[in-house]
Amino acid sequence: MIKIRFAKPDELRVVKEVYRKGFKEWTTGDPSFYYFLKLINRDRIKDKEILLAFDGKTPVGLCMFSLKTTVFSESAFLDILVVIEEYRSKGIGKLLVRAFLKSAKAKKVRLAFLSTWQGNWRSMKFYKRLGFKRYGHVFEAVATKCDEIFFSRKP
């Protein structure tokens, strides 16, 4: 049975390992991989902005988000959502997104935002199924060097 909970202060290494395993196809030479890896830190854990998914004692996915953004008021931004390959298509991503939305709602957030790169059709379809609507497009985003598609929904 999959359990979702906030990362604990001593689990920074665990969080980074799940990130590396989940994005293993991007670990060699992709600047966006390292950009997002740098966003994972103890402060994000302390601020309860990182959720982990566990199958028993095995960490299998993570969701990192920000509830205090300077761009939009009363909003949350989902930075990272990843499930390690062997556990994909089993509902874990949906559980993580729902936990993110629940946390955002508890903080009185009015809108939740996220983005994915232009060619990630599987991701776009997934977010639409969860009620997110496409609302914007950034050409050649700095971190990814490719077009970024933005989605939003109420928590």
Image: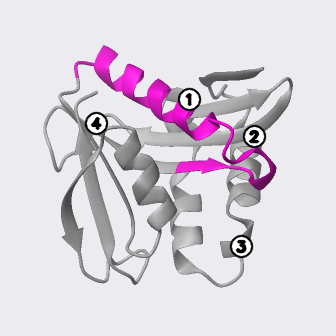
Say which element carries label 4: loop
Q: Which mark is residue 25?
A: 3
Say which element carries label 3: helix
Q: What residue type is disc 2 on?
A: Val
**Pointer 2 residue:** 60
Q: Where does the C terminus fall, quadrant-wise?
A: top left
Q: Nearer the viewer, mark 1 or mark 3?
A: 1
Q: What residue type is disc 3 on?
A: Glu
The magenta-colored residue range is 81-108
Q: Nearer the viewer, mark 2 or mark 4?
A: 2
Of the residues under marks 2 and 1, which one precedes in the sequence?
2
Q: What residue type is disc 4 on?
A: Lys
Please identify the residue farthest to the top as the structure is shown.
106
Residue drawn 17% across and 50% down? 71
Assess whether mark 4 and mark 1 are in contact (beta carbons under 8 angstroms).
Answer: no
Q: What residue type is disc 1 on?
A: Leu
**Pointer 1 residue:** 95
Task: Look at the image and say whether residue 105 sits in the magenta stretch.
Answer: yes
Q: Can residue 47 be seen by looking at this rendering?
A: no
Q: Which mark is residue 68?
A: 4
Task: State how far apart marks 1 and 3 are (Cα).
Answer: 23 Å
Q: Can residue 145 be seen by looking at this rendering?
A: yes
